[in-house]
Image (spheres, rainbow, N blue to C red):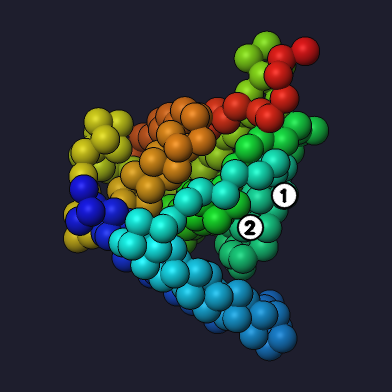
Amino acid sequence: SMLHLMNEYNHEIKSPWAVIISGVNNPKCSHEKLKELILKQFIRVDTTLDTMINILKGNRKANYVPLNINTVIENVMDLFQLRSIETIKNLGNLPNINGDLQDLQILFVNLFKNTIEAMAEEKHTVLIVTRHEQETNQIYIQITDTGKGIPENILKSIQDNEYITSKEKGGGIGLIVVKRIIRQHNGTFNVFSRKGLGSVFTIMLPTCNPPS
């Protein structure tokens, strides 16, 4: 419904502030780097507002172009200043996908934001793996964290495609947004999470190229 969609975009407007706060609290972030980060996030808020207005007017059209998912992931990770989190990347050699850059950026911002919030209090690790599944001609993306996990009620709501209010905690709204964007890209999304052990997010997206 329109109410659900508006709640999603309300969430997206708030997400850049989490990125900015992360940079402000990072002692290794230089003044120039911080200015650049803040400017990028203000541009992102402006773009999100324009998108929301276009949706309300019925003008928003997805702009699907060939994209390398590794580049999208790297660019989004650069927005976050990861302090107490060890990041391990195993990014494979990938063919392009047909994707909407703005939506894919929103997708990974939400996933990384969820991961950071789950691991903010202690030393944790996040593992990011991408590879080309040649048998199915799909891009495999897996993000694993060692955080506090997702509450069972939120996890069930995500799996059942249920609406989550902005008052509920645990990354629910952000992950509903992730699932919607992946579905629009003809992909699949799975979440496995255990309290106190962490979460595993698995995404499969079709490539641009026909199977060889």
Mark 2 residue element: helix
**Residue 71 image label:** 1
Name the residue at 72% across, 86% down: 32
Front-most of residues 53 and 14? 53
Q: Is residue 44 above or below residue 194?
A: below
Name the residue at 38% across, 48% down: 177
The amino acid on which the numbered mark 1 sits, given as a three-letter code, is: Thr
The amino acid on which the numbered mark 2 sits, given as a three-letter code, is: Met
Front-most of residues 127 and 91? 91
- Residue 126: percent from the left, percent from the top? 58, 46
Mark 1 residue element: helix
Front-most of residues 89 and 107? 107
C-alpha gap between disc 1 and disc 2 = 10 Å
Name the residue at 43% across, 29% down: 190
Q: Quadrant of the C terminus?
A: top right
- Residue 77: percent from the left, percent from the top? 63, 57
- Residue 114: percent from the left, percent from the top? 43, 53
Name the residue at 67% across, 80% down: 36
- Residue 73: percent from the left, percent from the top? 65, 49
Q: Which residue is mark 2?
A: 77
Q: Earlier in the sequence, mark 1 or mark 2?
A: 1
Whether residue 114 is visible to the viewer of this picture, yes or no, is yes
Whether residue 155 is visible to the viewer of this picture, yes or no, is no
Q: Residues within 10 Å of mark 1 (few under 14, many from 20)?
A: few
Q: Is residue 82 above or below residue 32?
A: above
Whether residues under marks 1 and 2 lie with C-beta atoms below 8 angstroms apart, the answer is: no
